[in-house]
């Protein structure tokens, strides 16, 4: 469950956490649920959250969110645990548009044990929901039930100015329902559910408000791939109510779902060369590659004055790039906006988001990608590629980058 002072940040962490650690596990036999990993495996998880938000028991708004995780198995231990490292992001679709703008991004790493529990440092905020699912050290038959402890750990620094990770203990009830099907493939079905009723102590510090009571539930259906030994998909229905110290009550109610998207090895050098040739006639367009994937950079990108509307020549350029992207299938795309060093930091940040979003909206309308496959981010003037003290350098820094992600 997520809470924001603007009440647009959704309950996204559960989906991120439930799926981040388990997709590349292999099971030992038909009734035993254990996780094992192969070092070097990479994968990503895409999930959606649809929720309604009410404030003081009155409907406020609805939100649609995309959560994305890109993870790698760094190494394994003799006890079957694996060190996982990767990035978590939460993106919100705003009214009047198709694209999803990244709200928060986190880097995290932790050991995932064979039964499902984590060994993770206190400095990491992700995963939000931890030790879920946890399986007992015995074979399971349909109808078997068990309980295992877990926790939700939230980042409320922006929401309330609460400096420390906000921990909510949970007791999860599991039921092994038995065989099922998912898109024509055999799976095992596991129910996971928990309720929360907490009256937490006042935090050590805060700046806006803090929860005085938290109540709600999460009801989840886990699709377990027995051959691979990890979750193949996830569904959740939830409702959580926060009573705040300033007298407000905020309710989140909705549903979430996610599926595994396996990462395929990218021929970066080959794709970079292919894109260089395809964009060779486009002015101020360059191509480069790094560990993230292959990036098309549009420098000195031109918008109408004080706006995020592309001028006709730039719109034509984006249209050609859209046709190129349409030929590179099954890869997610990150679109990042950058500005020159002018104006305030807040204004630069906002402008960089708006301009990246303008390019994303154009690519979506042109059919280059579905909205769920594009993430928008703004970096303001934080990542210059040239000297901002010259007009030429500032023009280069006013750019939008389109990265075809490897994972």
Image (tube, rainbow, N blue to C red):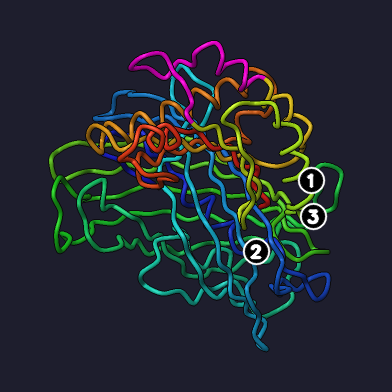
Q: Nearer the viewer, residue 82 or 3?
A: 82
CA–CA distance in space, label 1 to label 2:
17 Å
Residue at (75% x, 66% y) in the render: 229
- Sequence-first disc among 1 and 3: 1
Instruction: Find disc 1 in the rendering and name its residue.
Output: 182
Q: Within the image, what quadrant is residue 137 found in?
A: bottom right
Image coordinates for residue 360, horizontal then vertical, percent: 55, 27
Residue 300 percent location from the top left of the image: 47, 29
Q: Main secondary structure of the magenta part?
A: loop
Q: Are marks 1 and 3 in contact (CB under 8 Å)?
A: yes
- The boundaries of the magenta stretch are 300-319
Q: Residue at x 35, y 56 (%)?
A: 154
- The stretch drawn in magenta includes residue 188: no
Mark 3 crowdedness (10 Å alpha carbons): few <14, some 14-19, many ≥20 = many
Name the one closer to the observer, 30 or 372.
372
Task: Tell me the distance, in whole angstroms, between the alpha carbons under discs 1 and 3.
Answer: 6 Å
* Residue linked to disc 3: 187
In the image, 212: left or right of 361? left
47 horizontally vs 252: left or right: right
Whether residue 258 is visible, yes or no, is no
Describe the element under mark 1 as helix, strand or loop: strand
- Apparent side of residue 29 relative to residue 22 in the rendered image (left or right): right
Tell me what residue is drawn at x 52 percent, y 70 percent.
Answer: 148
Q: Is residue 82 left or right of residue 216?
A: right
The reply to whether dot 1 and dot 2 touch (C-beta < 8 Å) is: no
Is residue 287 shown above or below 99? Answer: below
Instruction: Classify 10 Å Cα crowding around label 1: few (below 14), some (14-19), many (20 and above).
Output: some
**As drawn, which residue projects farthest toward the top?**
312
Is residue 309 part of the magenta span, yes or no? yes
């Amino acid at each position: 469950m997520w809470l924001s002072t603007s009440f647009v940040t959704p309950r996204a962490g559960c989906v991120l956490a439930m799926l981040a650690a388990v997709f590349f596990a292999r099971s030992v036999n038909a009734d035993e649920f254990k996780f094992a990993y192969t070092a070097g495996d990479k994968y990503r998880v895409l999930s959606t959250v649809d929720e309604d938000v009410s404030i003081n028991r009155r409907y406020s708004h609805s939100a649609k969110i995309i959560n994305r995780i890109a993870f790698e198995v760094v190494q394994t231990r003799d006890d079957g645990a694996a060190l996982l490292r990767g990035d978590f992001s939460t993106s919100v679709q705003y009214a009047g548009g198709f694209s999803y703008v990244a709200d928060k991004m986190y880097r995290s790493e932790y050991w995932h044990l064979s039964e499902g529990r984590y060994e993770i440092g206190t400095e990491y905020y992700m995963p939000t929901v931890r030790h879920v699912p946890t399986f007992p050290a015995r074979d399971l038959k349909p109808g078997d039930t068990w309980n295992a402890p877990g926790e939700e750990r939230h980042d409320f620094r922006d929401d309330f100015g609460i400096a420390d990770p906000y921990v909510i203990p949970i007791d999860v009830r599991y039921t092994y329902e038995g065989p099922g099907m998912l898109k024509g493939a055999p799976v095992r079905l596991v129910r996971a559910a928990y309720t929360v009723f907490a009256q937490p102590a006042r935090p050590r510090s805060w700046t806006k408000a803090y929860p005085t009571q938290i109540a709600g539930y999460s009801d989840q259906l886990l699709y377990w791939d027995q051959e691979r030994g990890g979750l193949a998909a996830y569904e959740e229905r939830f409702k959580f109510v926060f009573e705040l110290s300033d007298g407000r009550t905020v309710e989140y109610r909705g549903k979430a779902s996610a599926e595994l998207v396996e990462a395929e090895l990218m021929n970066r050098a080959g794709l970079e060369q292919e894109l260089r040739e395809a964009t060779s006639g486009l002015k101020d367009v360059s191509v480069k590659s790094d560990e993230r994937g292959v990036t098309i950079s549009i420098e000195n990108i031109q918008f109408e004055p004080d706006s995020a509307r592309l001028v006709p020549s730039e719109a034509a350029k984006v249209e050609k790039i859209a046709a190129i992207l349409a030929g590179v299938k099954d890869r997610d795309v990150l679109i990042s906006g950058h500005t020159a060093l002018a104006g305030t930091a807040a204004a630069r940040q906002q402008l960089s988001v708006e301009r990246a979003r303008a390019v994303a909206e154009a690519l979506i309308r042109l059919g280059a990608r579905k909205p769920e496959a594009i993430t928008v981010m703004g970096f303001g003037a934080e990542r210059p590629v040239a000297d901002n003290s010259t007009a030429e350098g500032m023009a280069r820094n006013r750019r939008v980058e389109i990265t075809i992600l490897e994972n």
